[in-house]
Image (spheres, rainbow, N blue to C red):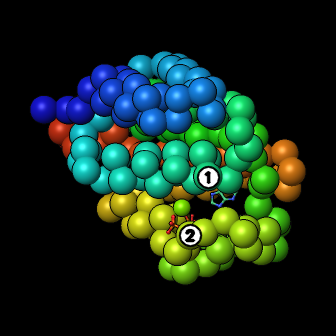
Amino acid sequence: VPLDLLQFFSELIEQERETVGEHHELIFKITGNTKGFWGDRGLLQQIFVNLMSNAIKYSPEGGAIEFHLIGKESQVMFSIKDQGIGIPIADQENLFQSFSRGSNVDTIPGTGLGLAISKACVDLHGGNITLSSQVGQGTKFIVSLPKNGKGEMGKG
Ligand code: ATP
Ligand code: MG
């Protein structure tokens, strides 16, 4: 059966809401038709948790974090946008490699594996992950995944 992404991400967001409490404002936006997606819950959760934990870790108390789920004809996209410290341009290119960390996170602990894991999960889905970021302004990661599976094949 296809995955009900609306329900799936609603639950993850609600869990996250309990964790972040008053520290961050979580915004959940949905656009378009997200039905007909075939994919793996474990991989999707892995992507979500890594991107969300970064958004929380690298943004200040009170910063809003927006999760936007977008359904298109043959793909779904989701983005996670924060109002955090941002990523220097020079660091952006290599960020998806294992153990790669930004030059502005010295005092914030981390291993540098979260994004590499996320990218691997996105690749397994045949999807794509990109980012846009400005230092001191915030960061947005965008994941796009083909709906694929039976949905696509079913169209013959
Ligand atoms: P961990 O393995 O525990 O996740 P990490 O957070 O350092 O450690 P990644 O999640 O792979 O590793 O992120 C790599 C680097 O990308 C981070 O160290 C940070 O420099 C930068 N980064 C990722 N997400 C954000 C974000 N939302 N805002 C600012 N910098 C970010
Ligand atoms: Mg991380």
Residue depicted at 52% across the width and 45% down the height: 52
Residue 146's disc is none
Percent of width and height locating residue 81: 66, 39
Ligand 1 is within 8 Å of the C-beta of the residue at disc 2: yes
Give left or right: position of 25 versus 77: right
Percent of width and height locating residue 82: 69, 41
Residue 110's disc is 2
Q: Amino acid at mark 1?
A: Lys
Say whether marks 1 and 2 touch (CB < 8 Å).
yes
**Foreground pick, 155 / 76:** 76
Q: Quadrant of ligand 2?
A: bottom right
Residue 19 shows in this picture? yes
Give left or right: position of 86 versus 145: right
Marks 1 and 2 sit apart, C-alpha to C-alpha, by 10 Å
Percent of width and height locating residue 55: 61, 47
**Foreground pick, 107 / 15:** 107
Ligand 1 is within 8 Å of the C-beta of the residue at disc 1: yes
Using the image, determine if residue 77 lies above or below residue 138: above
